[in-house]
Image: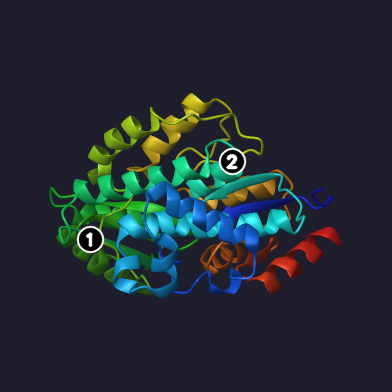
Amino acid sequence: MHGVSDMKFAFVFPGQGSQAVGMLDVWAGTPAAQAVMSEADAALNEDLSGLIARGPIEQLNLTTNTQPAMLAASLAVLAAWRAAAGPEPLVMAGHSLGEYAALTAAGVMDLADAVRLVRVRADAMQAAVPIGTGAMAAILGLEDDAVLAVCEQASHGEVVEAVNFNAPSQVVIAGHRAAVERAMENAKAAGAKRAVLLPVSAPFHASLLKPAAAVLAQALSHVTLRKPQIPVIQNVDVQMHQDPTEIVQALVDQAWHPVRWVQTIEAMAQQGVTHIVECGPGKVLSGLVKRIDASLVALSVNDPASLQAAIETLNNS
């Protein structure tokens, strides 16, 4: 029996960048979490849980491994939450790769299919742009419009675009490496506090990744998808799709379009959500939530203690 909460809360699932070797060690004594990892290992027919436990970090940081690892880790935490009779949310979302965790949590796809899909997604994304030719950078301290203008000025016939609207004055850009570096210089000249290259191997969500979308569409066509049992706000259009065909289209488009995270969190607040629970490793999304809307309570669930604390907060509010 799931706990009943009068509290309107949402789950959010993290994307790439929150991975760490040993990120699931704290769940070693939680059978529900371990069962998810065993299922993920079997789905890929490889020792993903061993890579998460022991590294090396260089291997875990390769997108082909990061994507299935973060998906499985987030769903392991969710399994622990459900095993502890934690309440179910009003709505869910996931950042980029995390959208697949949200859709799996909503019953749209099976764990095994989701793990294999994000491996395909990762490999297609990496294949679309050879290593070293693309880049991503975080621009801090400029409004969205200023970042868009900076990108336009820096393109010079190459691609550089705003690809993650993560929080007010916190935008990630991506594209050809040289164009991204020009945009970083322009951003600093325009008054950005910081412009930081991200340690990633592909320009995720840039239009350069359009070839990956076709590969992803093909893979999704072989997977059985169901209507969500809990609504999921999708990154690309900030809509809650019920029809699996529309869910697929939004996933395919998401690979090469921006993640509209600010609008996603705002949409949750408009539905009356007061608490947002980050389900999975790290605290990246909780930090963004606080910047987007200080009235929202952000709870990170990444170990058994924070899980129990979050359930108590929701059940006693």
Please identify the quarter of the rendering in which residue 211 is found. Answer: top left
What residue is pinned by disc 2?
A: 232
Circle 2/circle 1 CB separation < 8 Å: no
Q: Nearer the viewer, residue 98 or 37?
A: 37
What residue is pinned by disc 1?
A: 180
Vertical arrangement, residue 20 with respect to residue 79, above or below: below
Single out the residue that lies furthest toward the left.
157
The disc labelled 1 sits on which kind of residue? Val
Provide residue 10's location: percent of width, then percent of height: 67, 51
Provide residue 76's location: percent of width, then percent of height: 57, 58
Q: Residues within 10 Å of mark 2 (few under 14, many from 20)?
A: many
Instruction: Count the numbered circles shown.
Output: 2
Residue at 35% from the left image edge and 59% from the top image edge: 65
Label 2 vs label 1, nearer the camera: 2
The answer to whether one can see residue 118 in this image is: yes
Residue at 57% from the left image edge and 61% from the top image edge: 34
Residue at 26% from the left image edge and 56% from the top image edge: 202
Q: What's the image's color scheme?
A: rainbow
The disc labelled 2 sits on which kind of residue? Val
Secondary-structure class at tag 1: helix
In this picture, residue 37 sits left or right of residue 203: right
